[in-house]
Amino acid sequence: MTAREMIDSLSGTLLCDERILSVPERELLANLLQRTRAHGSASENAVAEAITRTVGEIVAERALGVLGESIIKQLFQQQLGASSSDPKRNAVIRAGSPPTSPPSPSPLPPPRPPGTSPPPISSGSPPTSPPSPSPLPPPRPPGTSPPPISFATTSTVQPKTGGVAVMEADDYLPAQCVILDEFLTPAELSALSQYVLEHEMQFEVSEVIAPGVTGGAVDYDHRRSRVLMNLDGHEKVITDRVLTCLPRVLKKWGRDPFAISRLETQTTASNHGDFFRCHVDNGAEAVAAREITFVYFFHREPKQFSGGELRIYDSRRENDNYVPTANYRTIVPEQNQLVLFASALSHEITPVECLSGQFADSRFTVNGWVHK
C-alpha cells in the first residue's frame, strides 16, 4: 500500500467516526465544497482550499483527543489485568479508610481520599482539570416523580429475579446510546402534546438533588426548565414500549438483563435560555437505583426553537461516580424520537434558543429512568 493509499484509508476511517465529524458537520462541509466547486473561479478555489486546511486542523485535533483517550483506556485495562494476576496487588483499600498491612514487605499505595464528581461545567465545554474534593458537591438530577408504575401488564418483558445478573460498573463508559425514531403513533403523539399544552399552569420550576442533601432544590446556575410530574396515564404508553424494547437494547450494549423495581417519569418544558449542565442521573443516594435513562423528544411543528441538544460524554469512574471526558456524542432533538443510555453516563442539555418565548414553542421531553 502506498503512502497516499494509507492516508486515504485513514481519512475514510476518521470520516466515519462521529466523534471526529458529526453527521451535520459532514453534510455542511459537503454542501460548502459542492457550492465552491460548482463555480470554479479562482476566488472560490481559494475558499475551498481554506476550508480544506481548516477541516484538516479540526480533524487532526479531535483525532489526537480520541487517540489519547483510547491509549489511556487500553493502558488502564492492561494495568487492571496485571493487578488481577498478581496476588500481592489484590488487596482493596476503600476511600477514607487507613491502609491495611500488605502481605509483602512492599507497602500498598495509600488509599484514595474521598471525593465527589466534578463541579458543573459550562455548556459544551469538556472538563479541563481533575476535580478536587468538596464538602458540598454539585447538585444532581431531578428528584423522584409520582408513585411507582405498576408492571402487571408488562410482566412478560421483565426477567425473573432468580438468577438475574445486575450490570457491573465499568471503570470507563463509552457514550453509547440507542435512538428509536417514530416512537409513538401519530394519535399517541397528538394526545400527549394536547395534554401537555392544556396543563401549562401545572408545570413547576425544575429542581436538582445533591448527594447527601435531603430533597430537591432550585439551582438556576445548574438547571433551568419547568417540569410536570403527572401525565395522567400518557406516560404509560411510553414506559410500556420502553420495557418492550429494553431486552434488545441491553443485548446491543452487551449487558446482562436486571430485575426492574420501578419506572420513574416526568415531563420537561425548556424555553429560551433554559439548560441543564453536565451531570449524572444516579449520583445521589435517593436516585442511585436508576440504571437506564430515556428521553422522548416532542415539539410543535415546524420546530420553533434551536439548541437544547443532548450531549452524552464518554465517562470514567472516579470516587464511586462517573465524570466526563473530553469526548461526547450530540443528539439533536427530533420529533417523536426516543434516546436510551446508561444513567451513570455524564450528560448535559445545551441552552435552548426560543425567540417567541411561548410555552407552546418549547422543547418538550418525557424523561424517564428504569430502576434496578
Image (spheres, helix red, strand yellow):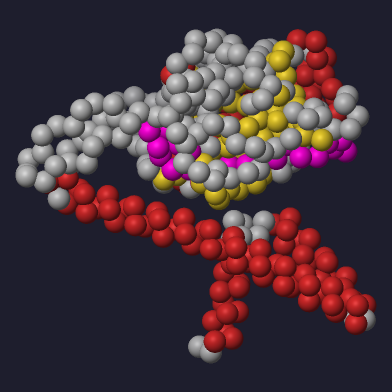
Image side of residue 40 versus residue 18, left or right: right
Residue 133 lies, in percent from the top left, at 43, 29
Q: Is residue 338 left or right of residue 305?
A: left
Image x and y of residue 64, in percent: 53, 63
Q: Which residues are magenta?
A: 301-323
Residue 56: quadrant of the picture: bottom right
Q: Is residue 365 left or right of residue 78?
A: right
Identity of the residue drawn at 40% across and 56% down: 72
Q: Is 97 colored magenta in this rendering?
A: no
User: What residue is shown at x 20% (from left), y 28% (from top)?
Assistant: 98
Is residue 275 visible in the rendered structure shown here?
yes
Image position, residue 47 (x, y; %): 84, 73
Residue 321 belongs to the span the image colors magenta: yes
Depicted 332 relative to depicted 34: above or below? above
Q: Nearer the viewer, residue 145 or 54?
A: 54
Q: Is residue 249 visible?
A: no
Q: Is residue 124 above or below residue 198?
A: below
Residue 265 coordinates in the image, percent (x, y): 60, 21
Residue found 10% across the figure and 34% down from its top? 101
> For residue 279, what is the image quadrant?
top right
Residue 199: which quarter of the image?
top right
The quadrant the C terminus occupies is top left
